[in-house]
Every structure is written in C-alpha cells, then in structure tokens.
Amino acid sequence: MPGLSFELPHWLYWVGLIAFPLIAMTLARRPKPQQQGYSTTLGYMILVAGGIIGLHRFYLKSLLGLIFLPFFVFILIANGQEHDARTVQSELTNALRGAERIIEREVPRVEETRADLPELEASVAEAEEGSFAQRSAEKRLDRAKDTIAKGEQRLAEARTTLEEVAPQEAEATETREFWSSAAGYAFYAILALMLIDAVLLPGMVKRANASLPAVEEKSEAEKALEAAEAEEGPKHDSEYAQNWIDRLSLFCGEFVSYWAVIAVFVYYFEVISRYVFQSPTNWAHEAMYLMFGMQYLIAGAYAMLTESHVRVDIFYAPLPKKKKAWVDLVTSIFFFIFAGTLLVTSWIFAVDAIAVPTGNSVISDWARGDVSFGGMLGGLNLGLWTDPAIRWGEISFNPWEVPLWPMKWVMVFGGLLLVLQGISKLSKDIREIARGN
C-alpha cells in the first residue's frame, strides 16, 4: 500500500486560515440562481475530497457510488491484517536479533574460556595441597567451567530460537507483503475509477441537472407567508449592526465560522491517511486544536453582539427595554473587569511568547526590552521570515514545531474585540435609557 507522508507547511496553515474564509464569504454572497442545480466545480471538489468512497456519485444521486465501497472496506480490512502481521513480524524480528546477538557474544567467550581450561587445570595441579593458591585456582577453574556450561546453554537456546523463529518471521513478512499488495491493488482500482469519473463528471452533472423537476413559481399567498415567517423569525446578523464596531464583530464572527469547514477537511484527511495509507500525521490534531482556540476567542464579540451566549434570564427576559438597559449598564462593570483582565493578560502572554530566550530576531529583542520600538521597526526586513538561522517566538513541542506566538497575539485581538463590543453595548444602553421609553 503506498504511503502518504505529508507535513503541513506552517505558511500553508496560515494562508489557509486567512484565504479559505475570504473565498467562502465571497461565494456565499453571490446571487443565488432561481433553480438550484448540481455544480461541476463542487462535483470535482467532492471527487478529490471524498471520491475514494464514491461521494461524488452520491452527490449526483447515483447509486453507482456503491461500487467504491467494497474496495474501500477491503482496504481497511487489508490494512488491519497488515498491521497485525507487522506486529507479529516485529516481535519475531526482535527475537531473531536477540538470538543473533547472543551467538555473537557467547561463541567467542566460550571458545576463549575453553582455551584457558588446560592452563587453569595445570594451576590447580601445581598448587600445594590445601593452600590458598590451590583454593583460588579451583575457584577460577569452577568459574570457567560454569561460564562454558551457561554459554553453551545460551547458545543452544539461541540456535533453537533461530531454527524455530526464522521460518515464522519469513511467513509473517510474506503475509504482511501480501496484504500490503492487496490493499495497494484495491487503492489503484479506486484511483482508476476516480480517473474515469473525472472524465465523465461533466456529463454526469448535465444529466443530473436535466432530471431535476421544473421550478414552479410561488403564489402570492406563499410569498406573503414566507415574508411573515421571516419577519417573526430570528433576526438576521446584519440587523444587529448599528456602528463600525458591530460590523467588525459580525465580520470576524462570520470569518472564523468557516474554520469549522476547514476542520472537516483536515480530520477527513487524517482519518484517510491513518487508516487507508497507514500514515498518521503529526500536525492535524494540533493544528485544529490551536485553530478552535483562536476561533473561540475571536468569536466572543460576535456572540456578545448577537446575544448567543447561554444564560438564565428568568427575571431579565420579561423586563422592558429601558430596565434591561439599566441592568446591562450596571452589570457591565463585571464585564469590563473580565474583558480588561483578558486583554491585559493576553498582552503579557503575547509579548512573552516572542521574547523566548532562543529568539535572535529584532522583534524578540524588542519584546525582551533590548531595543526600542522604533529600533525594532527600523530593523524589520524580509530576512526575518526567510533566513533559517533566525529563530524567534515560542514554538510547540510537537515535531511539527508550529510557532505559538501568533496564537497568543490572536488572544490580544480577541480581547480587544470583546472590549470594543462592550463599549458598543454600553453606548446602546445609555441611548436606550436616554430615550426614556
């Protein structure tokens, strides 16, 4: 089975987090056609992402996608068998290596000791009867005989192990290679089916769209009912925006919401690489763990604006707008204590993250107080990002070694957004109280 060794470059991680939401937001704002149909572009995306299990066929409502499933299931079974065979092979290989090391160590020791036996026996014979020299010589002779006996025993056991284990190890190796080849052939069969469907996909999309029923124009009653439901339903996000702070919070909330889509693709890639290609990644979990942490912080202002936080408002909900504004105004003291603490501590964490002792860039020097802010700005250049000898900022302990300092600065940005949104809410409450309604 072919491997899939891929480590996500750090630059691609950040480009993906920035570019993907912008593209998704642009596509989401496109005018929607009156009749929704199947998309060739989306079909190819699904083919690349999920073609290995025939998802592109299911997207087009084609049951021929079921053809992919037996091959995929067989790959999973074959990989499981290969994993078991690899475990057995590893254990047997270790046993063989241990036996070979015993033979390499004991053969010279036994031969050397056996060669010394005549000399030791002669020393015993020449020593005076009952003397200390005789007893010492006898002990050396006994130790030599014991060394030979134990060595021969170890050699016999090692040679027996070689005779018994070597065929088993060869059989395990053959089994592993068989299942690896079987999984590989199944994968190549799926790949061939995907290539065929890549050619046929435009025609498949065209036929699927042709089979869609015609869209009937809605009656005036239906349009009126939909308008009434929309009016009574939850507010649209845009209705919350009353100033530039609200619009910034809405934009940031929508921006990071698309990161959840990235997580779907990354975890899908991790599952496929781990269970199909037997190549688990060392970056997928950490990348998504850090991404969700940043999403949580940036989306805080959006949740506050749209009142999405979970709360128990048995007494608050029935109050009129003016009294709600008074309650919000009083409780905002506690909010600003929290948001201000978050902002200050995040700033400390962020500065500490780029002031790590291993940092040798001008930015790390500024964070440690070695240079002024102006000196830091004057020392900025492209080499900070391209020179491998320059190391700055905290990195993870994972072999992926992704820089952690950007995440710490996102904490600062999230805290700042929360403080700004609190100011916006405070101004709205003051205006509501001033109206006197």
Image (spheres, rainbow, N blue to C red):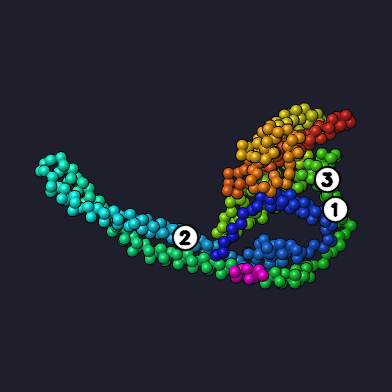
Of mark 1 and mark 3, the one earlier in the sequence is 1
- Residue drawn where x is 10% and y is 43% of the image: 129
Type of amino acid at the residue the image marks with label 1: Leu
Of mark 2 and mark 1, the one earlier in the sequence is 2
Q: Secondary structure at mark 1?
A: helix
Check disc 1 and report the residue beneath it.
225
Q: Position of residue 425 (x, y in %)?
A: 80, 34
Q: What stretch of residues is rendered in magenta? A: 188-195
Q: Secondary structure at mark 3?
A: helix
Q: Residues within 10 Å of mark 1 (few under 14, many from 20)?
A: few
Q: Secondary structure at mark 2?
A: helix
Using the image, determine if residue 239 lies above or below residue 4.
above
- Residue drawn where x is 71% and y is 41% of the image: 410
Check disc 3 and report the residue beneath it.
238
Q: Position of residue 125 (x, y in %)?
A: 12, 48
Using the image, determine if residue 56 lies above or below residue 398.
below
Check disc 2 and report the residue beneath it.
86
Tell us which disc is closer to us: 2 or 1: 2
